[in-house]
Amino acid sequence: MFEACRIRLAFAERLRRRKAFHRARRHLLDAGTGFAAMGAQPWLTRTHQELRATGYRPADEPPDAVTSLTAQELEVAHLAASGLTNRQIAERLYLSHRTVGAHLYRVFPKLGVSSRAGLRDALSARPGLDRPAPEPTATRAR
């Protein structure tokens, strides 16, 4: 069952990257159900991040700052809150420093802050904004 869920997750990630969001959601929801039943929390977290990236929002979950941040915005926000400059964040995430600035420009109003110190406080005060789980695989292809 675990392997089937991992395969569904991998296939759904590929579908999402090819912009087949509806098909990806179906596989992600099935994989999430399986991971939840097994108690595989890191895999479940990764599945939820992929679901958010497809634009999926559960019917009982109101849109707020937690759900409106994309996975990349959340990662940029955490790195900025830790004290890294835009250029350092860009190097770490293989992005342009201008893209990092654009992410922060969108993150600040979503969290209701106006500085990096406020960003740090907002991230630590909200339980839903904890650091995204690293990918459970040992190697990551770029």
Image: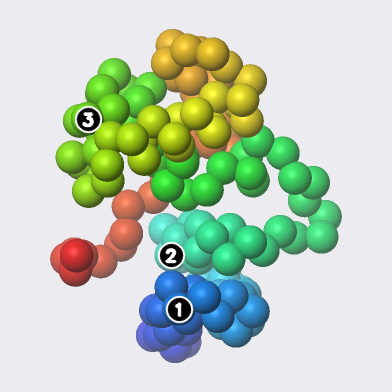
Q: Which residue is mark 3?
A: 87
Most extreme residue toward the front is 98
- Residue 22 x, y percent position in the rendering: 64, 79
Q: Which residue is mark 2?
A: 43
| Vertical comparison of 107 with 10: above or below | above
- Residue 67 x, y percent position in the rendering: 64, 46
| Vertical comparison of 63 with 34: above or below | above
Task: Say which of marks 2 and 1 sits in front.
Answer: 1
Question: Depth check: 128 or 70 in front?
Answer: 70
- Residue 119 x, y percent position in the rendering: 48, 20
- Residue 128 x, y percent position in the rendering: 58, 38
| Vertical comparison of 88 with 72: above or below | above
Colouring method of the image: rainbow
| Vertical comparison of 26 with 94: above or below | below
Three-letter amino acid code of the residue under disc 1: Arg
Three-letter amino acid code of the residue under disc 2: Trp
Number of disc labels: 3
Q: Which residue is mark 1?
A: 18
Seen at 54% across and 13% down, the residue is 114
Query: Given contact means CB atoms under 8 Å apart, are the residues at marks 2 and 1 in contact?
Result: no
Q: Is residue 48 visible?
A: no
Structural crowding at the residue carrying mark 3, measured as other residues with C-alpha within 10 Å and reported as few (<14), some (14–19) or many (≥20): some
Q: Choose top left, top right, bottom left or bottom right for residue 79.
A: top left
Seen at 63% across and 20% down, the residue is 112
Query: Given contact means CB atoms under 8 Å apart, are the residues at marks 3 and 1 in contact?
Result: no
